Every structure is written in C-alpha cells, then in structure tokens.
Image (spheres, helix red, strand yellow):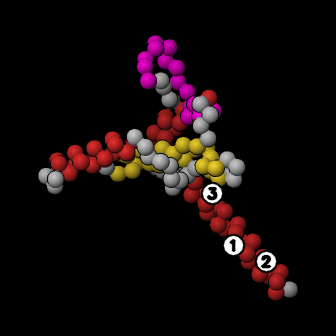
Amino acid sequence: MILYRIYKVVILFLLLIVASSCAEQKKKYPADIEEKIKLVENSLAGWAETGNNDRWSLEERMKELNIKGVSIAVIHNYQIEWARGYGFADVSENRPVNEKTLFQAASISKSLNSLGVLKLAEEKKT
C-alpha cells in the first residue's frame, strides 16, 4: 500500500514537471508583442523584391528548407523583447525547441558584439 502511494506521488510529480515545461515552451506576451510575433511567424519575405510580394509562414519555410528547429529572439532597446522556439531541438527524442534551447550563434554574434561595442563607445566606456 505504501509503495502504491509513493508511486502515485512520483507520477504526480512527473506530470507537474512535464506540464510546467510545456507551459514554458510558449510564453505569453502582451497583445501588442503577440501581434508582432504573428507577423514574424506568418509574413516572411525573400531577400530581394521580385514584384510578386511572395510571403511565407515560418512553418512553411522550415518545412521547405528541411529545418528541424529554430529559435528567434528580438532585441529592442538593448533588451530581449520576445523569444520563442519552433520545431524540435532533437527529433529522435521529440524534444521541442523553446526560448531556452541553446544553438550555436555563429555569425549573428558579430552583429550583437558590434552593437555592444557601439553602445559602450556611446557611453564613453571604452
């Protein structure tokens, strides 16, 4: 009987962990930020204007380019305005990307580094 109670407590604990991690995956933002997120998710365009105004959803582009997972963070006034993950960090484990999933930053880090250097120069801290 005591083993059954321990089993129930462990199962409840695991369910709470899973529920909290699922809730964490899609953080809710204020309505104005959610509108901006929807624009990013549903209004992707090509690099060059071709005159036909093609637009794609993030989901469509990920599928077409065979991208399993992506994380997006938008910085506004030197603060992260919003961050969200899409797809899977590990397809074999069915582990979804969230805003805490780590990816290699690669060349995007150069832009962020230069922004930091310019901010320090503006504040005369270099």
Residue type (three-letter) at the residue carrying disc 3: Cys
Residue 45 percent across, percent down from the top left: 48, 25
Of the residues under marks 1 and 3, which one precedes in the sequence? 1
Q: Nearer the viewer, residue 99 or 35?
A: 99
In this rendering, does residue 122 appear at all? Answer: yes
Q: Which of 29 and 45 is in front in this view?
A: 45
Identified at 50% across, 14% down, the residue is 52
- Magenta segment includes 114: no
Q: Give the range drawn in magenta.
A: 47-63
SS of the residue under disc 1: helix
Q: Main secondary structure of the magenta part?
A: loop
- Cα–Cα span, label 1 and label 3: 14 Å
SS of the residue under disc 3: helix
Of the residues under marks 3 and 2, which one precedes in the sequence? 2
Identified at 24% across, 48% down, the residue is 117
Whether residue 21 sits left or right of residue 29 in the image: it is right
- Identify the residue position indicated by label 1 in the image: 13
Residue type (three-letter) at the residue carrying disc 1: Phe
The residue carrying pointer 1 sits among few (fewer than 14), some (14 to 19) or many (20 or more) residues within 10 Å by Cα, namely few
Residue type (three-letter) at the residue carrying disc 2: Tyr
Q: Are marks 3 and 2 in contact (CB under 8 Å)?
A: no
Residue 100 percent across, percent down from the top left: 51, 55
SS of the residue under disc 2: helix
- Identify the residue position indicated by label 2 in the image: 7
Of the residues under marks 2 and 1, which one precedes in the sequence? 2
